[in-house]
Image (cartoon, rainbow, N blue to C red):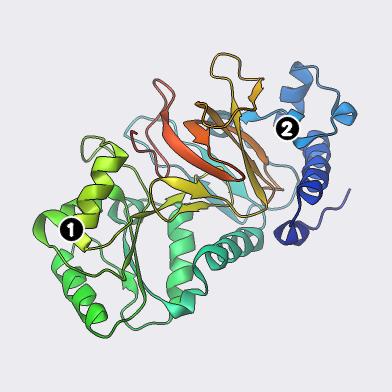
Amino acid sequence: MNINAGHFFSIQTEAAFNEAALDVFRFQAANNSIYRAYISHLKVDVEGISNYKDIPFLPISFFKSHSVVSSNQPIEITFRSSGTTGQITSKHLVQDLSIYEDSYNKAFELFYGKADDYCILALLPSYLERDGSSLIYMVDDLLKQSSHAKSGYFLHNHEELYQTLQELKLVKQKTILIGVTYALLDFTEQYQIDFPELIVMETGGMKGKRKEMVRAELHQLLCASFGVKHIHSEYGMTELLSQGYSKGDGIFECPPWIKILLRDTSDPLTILSAEYTTGGINVIDLANINSCSFIATQDLGKIHGENRFEIMGRFDNADIRGCNLLVQ
């Protein structure tokens, strides 16, 4: 079976998503040895599944212990999750970087427009200080597309960031500040700016640098410090090739090639149908064609209507890693 990954990005209807998800499921069940062994252990009849909600989800922990790939293509890049010293981290063996690039570019354009319309500032010290970050790969590309003279990274040089924001505010330049949560808080302890048009996008996570905070408290503090009405957020992880975005209040939306489902916390094979019920987050990411598109994450969340969801926290003893894992 040959699957054109580019086809996923034009999905518009539930029926089209279901058809594509079933094609990917059958492809990965046949070609991904780890996923095949997992669904065989569950005694799943692959051909008997006719709806994407019945597809088994691979526990995300398999990315720590196995090479989760669905073809014999060469590996172009290996993305690795962050982790504290001694922690086993996940690895995502990416065989076609062009799919990842299409995915994040199309999602960014869907929610924000063209990158070259913005000045993009990145405050991501913990990501820059390690190798293999999928977030840094994406931000690098967005910075190049921005082409604005002031676009770039700010490691710990908060004074320079503050001056840059002041200059951009004066000329009314559309600006996005992407920052890891603890670094944004570090900045606000020294500087405040009233820049209502600024988009502040936190990627979540204290990375062991600070005590975890309740999202509402964090966003209130950041809103006051930057003079904005809402704090935006990005939801992504090493094991996926797509992102969701929140434009405020912690409610994320996904592009059409992603679906978020909830599983019962006491019965991981049962999918919950009720909205606003808390459950484990399962993600279908059709862009992840050469790995596994059906991932049971360690995040807890709620569904808020079609492809809108909220992250409530993490399962007990789950690693604190990835993007946007704030305590709710």
Q: Is residue 5 above or below residue 309?
A: below
> Which image quarter is the C terminus in?
top left
Residue lying at 64% horizontally and 52% vertically, measured from the top left: 75
- For residue 24, which numbered disc appears in the image? none
The residue indicated by pointer 2 is 53
The image quadrant that residue 88 belongs to is top left
Estimate the x, y position of residue 222 in percent, counting from the top left: 23, 53
Residue 225's label in the rendered image is 1
Q: Secondary structure at mark 1?
A: helix
Q: Find residue 304 and report its horizontal and vertical position in percent.
A: 53, 40
Q: CA distance from mark 1 to mark 2?
A: 42 Å
Residue 119: x and y in percent read 37, 76
- Residue 4: image quadrant is bottom right
Q: Nearer the viewer, residue 273 or 319?
A: 273
Residue 146 higher or lower than 244, as above or below: below
118 with respect to 167 (left or right): right
User: From this viewpoint, is residue 93 visible?
Assistant: yes
Direction from residue 319 to residue 16 in the image, left or right: right
Name the one closer to the observer, 85 or 185.
185
Residue type indicated by callout 1: Ser
Tags 1 and 2 in contact by the CB under 8 Å rule?
no
Image: 55 above or below 236: above
Q: Residue at x 17, y 64 (%)?
A: 158
The mark tally for this picture is 2
Mark 1 or 2, nearer chain start: 2
Q: Residues within 10 Å of mark 1 (few under 14, many from 20)?
A: many
Residue type for callout 2: Lys
